[in-house]
Image: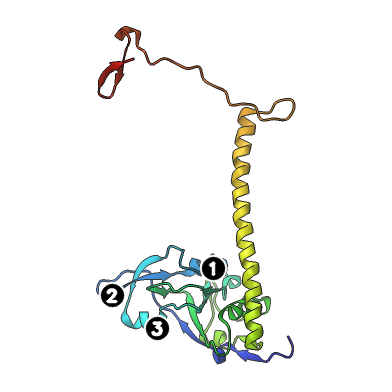
Amino acid sequence: MSEWPNVKLADVADIRFSNVDKKSTPGELAVRLCNYMDVYGNGGYVTADRAYMDASASHAEVERFGIEKGDVIITKDSETPDDIGIPAVVLDDIPKLVCGYHLALIRPNRKAIHPIYLAMQLATKTTATYYSRLANGSTRYGLSSSAIASTRIPLAPLLQQRRIAEILSTVDEAIEQTEALIEKLRQVKAGLMHDLFTRGVTPDGHLRPRATRPRTSTRNPRLGGYRRSGKGFCLG
């Protein structure tokens, strides 16, 4: 809204560019790594029920890039400008999870901005256009720390932020449930197509019954009423 002040992202959050790679190095701490696709392809949320990659990190990297509930993570570089700045908010406490390379970890000041509200603001078309315009590169595009720090955020009163976050989270949950239902219906359709194309339908539109194979006897007439089993011969 026009009466909400526009603030810089750096004024309401701490921004950290990760340099933690996917390697496991002897002597480092064993961690789980939140990678690019864990942010980009997870519907805007980082949750504990996802399988994260095993890797390692130094004590300093874990201290700086360890992920906490309420953090917001964005893609900071990609092959196309349109894929930069995609946000995901961390909903759960996930032990040993560390922010990986190609990502920026944003830790909001909870007294100023709600994490989900922040993530939703970063997902707006206005912010996406800003990031696309400032992305540098030719074969791979990236955002500078100053570009991310200068991202403008309309700052609603905190109570309104919480309410907006609740509404949008509810919508996302409904979308997730609908997508799961659609996937189930796709599976049902695939099974129905198989039955229709292999069994056909009766004149009144019902699915034809499955063809039954004639029952064959296991009796071997040459064995005089006996059949072979895994343990030798038994009575047929």
Q: Is residue 49 visible?
A: yes
Query: How many marks on residues?
Result: 3
Tell me where residue 177 appears, x and y as whole percent.
61, 59
**Mark 3 or mark 1: which comes first in sequence?**
1
**Which residue corresponds to mark 2?**
28
Name the disc covering residue 64, or none.
3
Mark 2 belongs to which amino acid?
Glu
Crowding around mark 3 (Cα neighbors within 10 Å: few <14, some 14 to 19, many 20+) is some
By what rule are the colours in the image chosen?
rainbow
Name the disc covering residue 40, or none.
1
Q: Give the quarter of the figure containing the C terminus.
A: top left
Left or right: where does residue 3 sit relative to residue 222? right
Q: Residue furthest front?
A: 235
Tag 2 secondary structure: loop
**Mark 2 or mark 3: which comes first in sequence?**
2
Question: Spatial distance from mark 3 to mark 1, Cα to Cα?
Answer: 22 Å
Tag 1 secondary structure: helix
Mark 1 belongs to which amino acid?
Tyr
**Residue 74 or residue 138, whichever sits in front:** 74
Tell me where residue 77 appears, x and y as whole percent.
52, 74
Mark 3 belongs to which amino acid?
Arg
Crowding around mark 1 (Cα neighbors within 10 Å: few <14, some 14 to 19, many 20+) is many
